[in-house]
Amino acid sequence: MQLRFSKMHGLGNDFVVLDCRHGGFPLRPAQIRALADRHTGVGFDQLLSVEPARDPSCAFYYGIWNADGSPSGQCGNGVRCVAAWLHRAGALALGQTVQIESPSGPVAVRLLDAHAAIVNMGEPVFEPARIPFEAATAAPRYRLALDGEEREIGAVSLGNPHAVMTVATLDDPALVRLGPLLSGHARFAQGANAGFVQRLDRAHLKLRVHERGAGWTQACGTGACAAMAVLHQRGEVDDHVQVALPGGTLAIDWTGPGQPLWMSGPATFVFEGVWAVVGAG
């Protein structure tokens, strides 16, 4: 089988996008892993499928698969790329706000231009059972046993679970070890995206994210939202924050409980291609 795809990225967080609007999703987990391989496949952090909506209030559905073949519930950089892809396909006009269905539910997206979008990511979820995270009650800080030490994190869901740890500097070599440990910590029943955030001031953060199922990425949209939400809950940042990631900067806006969180940033096409699927049929 010959599989046509688009390669895209949002601040270096890269994707393969498949047009599944007229047929079912064609790949098995082993085939996703083969396509994700950066040496023998195409390479990506996440695979995105554009499909017919299940929810009648939405225009389209998009599926999300990590590089290891596991499914994901939400992808902030990915939804901007889906919106730009739909515009390029003639299915979404500039300036039009549309509901697109993710595995975690609908998100509202508006294209600012052909290469940038703003996304309503919904209200951050801090209740432990809904993240899911093992804790008796919701709190702005949790103590977690990690690598033989007690460390402090915040926990939140933006459609997928996030652990957020404040650090003095992102250059700390210990983060290379802590990222996978935090992503796979037993108190996160489904794993977590592990975000390490350096607070510069009330309007500027620096962030690195180790994503469950993908590893270290150049950018993580939901991770940027999570870092801002956790620090906003603690009163440490303002309602508008710039989050600098290795691949670039995202703008995050949130006024607090009861209100949706907004993320804006770029979406970039890299190339179109055809991949020969091994083991198809």
Image: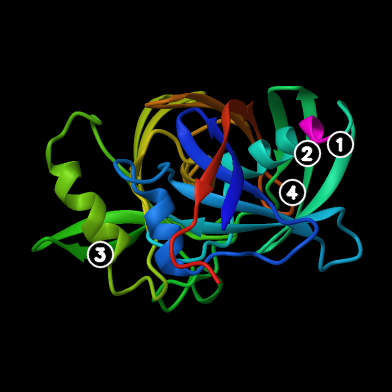
Residue bearing mark 2: 86
Q: Residue at x 51, y 33 (%)?
A: 237
Dot placed on the residue nearer the N-terminal end, 3 or 4: 3
Q: CA distance from mark 1 to mark 2?
A: 5 Å
Q: CA distance from mark 4 to mark 1?
A: 26 Å
| Pair 4/1: label in front | 1
Residue bearing mark 1: 92
Dot placed on the residue nearer the N-terminal end, 4 or 1: 1
Mark 2 and mark 1 in contact (Cβ < 8 Å)?
yes
Dot placed on the residue nearer the N-terminal end, 3 or 1: 1
Q: CA distance from mark 3 to mark 4?
A: 29 Å
Dot 1: few (<14), some (14–19), or many (≥20) neighbours within 10 Å? some
Dot placed on the residue nearer the N-terminal end, 4 or 2: 2
Q: Residue 198: x and y, percent? A: 33, 32
Q: Amino acid at mark 2?
A: Leu
Q: Amino acid at mark 4?
A: Gln
Dot placed on the residue nearer the N-terminal end, 1 or 2: 2
Q: Amino acid at mark 3?
A: Leu
Which disc number belongs to residue 259? 4
Q: CA distance from mark 3 to mark 2?
A: 42 Å
Mark 2 and mark 3 in contact (Cβ < 8 Å)?
no
Q: Residue 103: x and y, percent? A: 65, 64
Q: Residue at x 28, y 67 (%)?
A: 185
Mark 1 and mark 3 in contact (Cβ < 8 Å)?
no
Dot 2: few (<14), some (14–19), or many (≥20) neighbours within 10 Å? some
Which disc number belongs to residue 144? 3
